[in-house]
Image (tube, helix red, strand yellow):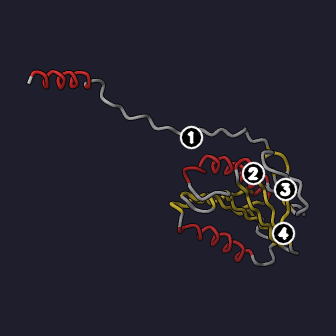
Amino acid sequence: MKRIALPILSLLLLGCGNDPLPKPKGYLRLEYPKAVYKKAVIPLPFSFEKNKLSEPIKTVKSTATTHGIDVKYPSLNATIYLTYKEVHNNLDSLLRDAQNLTQKHTIKADEISQGEFINAENRAYGMLYEIGGDAASQSQFYVTDSTTHFLSGSLYFYAKPNYDSIYPAAEYLKKDIKRIMETVRWKE
């Protein structure tokens, strides 16, 4: 009996030690360069400032009254898609279309918050929608002068929507979207 008890007692004494502690949570730390803005050179009836981190502006589609513009961020795997349309007594329709595009994301979105934008000095009025959750687009917006010009935009990432993974980049690009809205100048 002593032969069995002594090894068991030894194991119990050696096995007793510090209680196991859970490992601390690890967080992904992403650092983006400080944004430096410059005026975008585009042959359209408006201008705005864009982040130098983005590629040069490319007009991707154009008709007589509609122009598509891509502001690409290869290092973030994202693009801000801009669409410019002339207003011809159809402002209600353009506003409804922009709002409906945002509402299509409610299926996957956890929340959609909106912020009104007013810059009376430069005749720029709009709305910024921030979409939380695993939606395809994390931000959408529009800016208009209410009479002639209408600019809408959407932020998309070239990755499967996973809000936790793209959140830092979405927050970084949301500042660029706000800068676009703040610096829109209509050409007459």
Q: CA distance from mark 2 to mark 1?
A: 20 Å
Q: Are marks 3 and 4 in contact (CB under 8 Å)?
A: no
Residue identified by numbered label 4 = 61
Quadrant into which the N terminus falls: top left
Report crowding for label 1: few under 14, some 14 to 19, many 20 or more residues within 10 A (C-alpha). few
Under mark 2, the amino acid is: Tyr
Residue identified by numbered label 1 = 28
Residue 184 in picture, x, y percent from top left:
80, 56
Q: Residue at x 78, y 78 (%)?
A: 89
In the image: residue 188, left or right of residue 182: right
> First in sequence: mark 1 or mark 3?
1
> First in sequence: mark 1 or mark 4?
1
> First in sequence: mark 2 or mark 1?
1
Which residue, as the protein is rendered here, is positioned at the far left?
1
Q: Based on the displayed image, in which of its 4 quarters is residue 24 positioned?
A: top left
Q: Based on the displayed image, in which of its 4 quarters is residue 163 positioned?
A: bottom right
> First in sequence: mark 3 or mark 2?
3
Secondary structure, mark 4, is strand
Report crowding for label 2: few under 14, some 14 to 19, many 20 or more residues within 10 A (C-alpha). some
Front disc: 1 or 3: 1
Q: CA distance from mark 4 to mark 2?
A: 19 Å
Residue 159 in picture, x, y percent from top left:
64, 57
